[in-house]
Amino acid sequence: MSYTVKRLILSGKLKRGQKLSLNRLARDLNTTIPIIAPTFKQLEKEGLIISKGKKGSFVALPFNRFVGSRCKYNLTILDYQSLRGI
C-alpha cells in the first residue's frame, strides 16, 4: 500500500503541503483505515509525509530530495522521464 501512495505523490496527484485524510485515501484506494494507517507511518519515516498531531498529516518532503535519495531504485525509466519536467 505504501508503494501506491508513494506513486500518487510522485505522480503529482498528491501535492506537497496537501492534507491527507486516512478516511478518504482508504476509500479512494478501496481499502480500510487499518490497512492504510501503517502506510502513513512508513511514509512518515521515509520523510514523504509529516504528521502535525491533531492538525493531520501532510505531503512533506521537497520532491527532488525524495526522488534522488530514496526512490531511485523503485522508479522505471518512464517514471524518471515523466518527473524531469517537475
Image: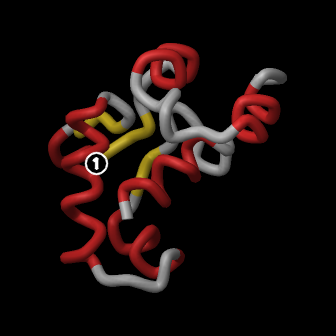
Q: Which residue shows up at 25% across the image and 75% down it? A: 35
Q: Can you give x and y, in whole percent of width and height, for residue 41 in the image?
A: 19, 49
Q: Nearer the viewer, residue 54 or 47?
A: 47
Q: Which residue shows up at 40% across the image and 75% down it? A: 26
Q: Quadrant of the C terminus?
A: top right
Q: Where is residue 80, by image quadrant?
A: top right
Q: Can you give x and y, in whole percent of width and height, for residue 54 in the image?
A: 18, 48
Q: Nearer the viewer, residue 43 or 67?
A: 67
Q: Can you give x and y, in whole percent of width and height, for residue 71 in the image?
A: 47, 31
Instruction: Tell me if residue 74 comes above or below residue 8 in the rendering.
Output: above
Q: Secondary structure at mark 1?
A: loop
Q: Nearer the viewer, residue 4 or 41?
A: 4
| Left-right relation of 64 to 33 | right
Q: What residue would you read off at disc 1?
A: 56
Q: Which residue shows up at 83% across the image and 23% down it? A: 85
Q: Which residue shows up at 54% across the image and 32% down it? A: 16
| Residue type highlighted by circle 1 | Gly
